Image (cartoon, rainbow, N blue to C red):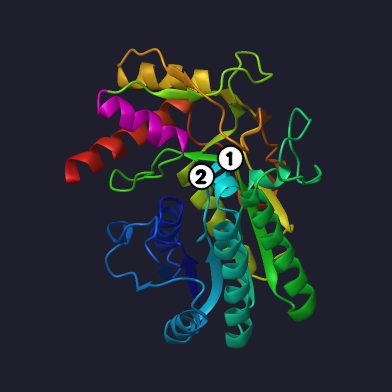
Amino acid sequence: MTWLVTGGAGYIGAHVVRALAAADMPVAIVDDLSSGHEGFVPRGVPFARGSILDGALLQRVMREREVTGVIHIAGFKYAGESVKRPLHTYEQNVDGTTVLLAAMEDHGVDRIVFSSSAAVYGMPAVERVTESTPTAPQSPYGESKLIGEWLLRDQGVATGLRHTSLRYFNVVGSGYPDISDTSPHNLFPLVLTALREGRTPRIFGDDYPTPDGTNVRDYVHVSDIAAAHVAAARRLDAGEPLEPAYNLGSGDGLSVRQIMDAVARVTGIAFVPEVADRRPGDPPRIVADGELAARDLDWRMRHTVDEMVASAWEAENASASAT
């Protein structure tokens, strides 16, 4: 009854792996370490370094570890960068998912939890996004995630694959000091690394149609995200029904300026952020309704924004001290 976590050495994946282990659910990892870190892998957890494009590797791991379910987190996850690298994005996120699903079918693995994204909604003209809000992705990244959901749907029709897709909103914070978000594009690591290095953080665009001109986002703690994956995996193991997709969001939005204020408050470092150009593919506002996930996945916000910042700051400094 082992769950294979693709991308399990990454920031989100590592939290999911530890949450599964804490729930006494056997787990194995495949990760090519293109953005993950072998140091994030807990001692004793089976780890295979390689790409999800390598079907033979996936089948070997599934066979050797007696895999019965997959949590698919591996992928190229940067919306703005995907506009510059569409072919790479589709290769990693669409081709990779196709290869994974083929390996699962060949090995008889019939359940999967898919790491999707709020990017499937694009720039929704609603105050709060629900799962029935029309999808209209604005970047190759968002498109690739929506195609991933379609692949699961169609494979479910063809083979009986049981599946659900978890649409993350802005994942931040840390559940462990030794796991930090090392993305070169995400807001929290950009801001916290700049402060630690004595630089001034930047805001990407202050002319959006929002109350203070900066993007409004739905920030959720990575440990809460990990707990939802465990809940989804448990329901699939038990044969209980799940919706095709769930929003993992708070229902409340915070602007980038509000996040900057929280960072200054928590770190005790006063600063006035610089303003840079908008990044391509970034919508002005996207905030989620998480009622379905609350109903089925015990989804709830267990952390305040200050706690999110504090946990990220602790992990950022711990990571810097370790290098």
* Residue 101, placed above or below residue 314: below
Residue 210: image x %, image y %?
66, 18
| Mark 1: secondary structure | loop
* Residue 140, placed above or below residue 5: above
Residue range highlighted in magenta: 186-198
Could you say which is closer to the camera, residue 128 or residue 7?
7
Give the residue number, with chain letter if any, for mark 1.
300
Number of other residues with Cα within 10 Å of mark 1, as a class: few under 14, some 14 to 19, many 20 or more: some
Mark 1 or mark 2: whose residue is earlier in sequence:
2
Q: CA distance from mark 1 to mark 2?
A: 7 Å
Residue drawn at x 70%, y 60% as measured from the top left: 147
| Mark 2: secondary structure | helix
The answer to which image quadrant residue 198 occupies is top left
The disc label shown at residue 141, or none: none
Q: Image check: 205 left or right of 105? A: left
Residue 151: image x %, image y %?
71, 67
Residue 41: image x %, image y %?
32, 61
Magenta: predominant secondary structure element?
A: helix
Q: Image check: 232 left or right of 45? A: right
Give the residue number, with chain letter if any, for mark 2.
224
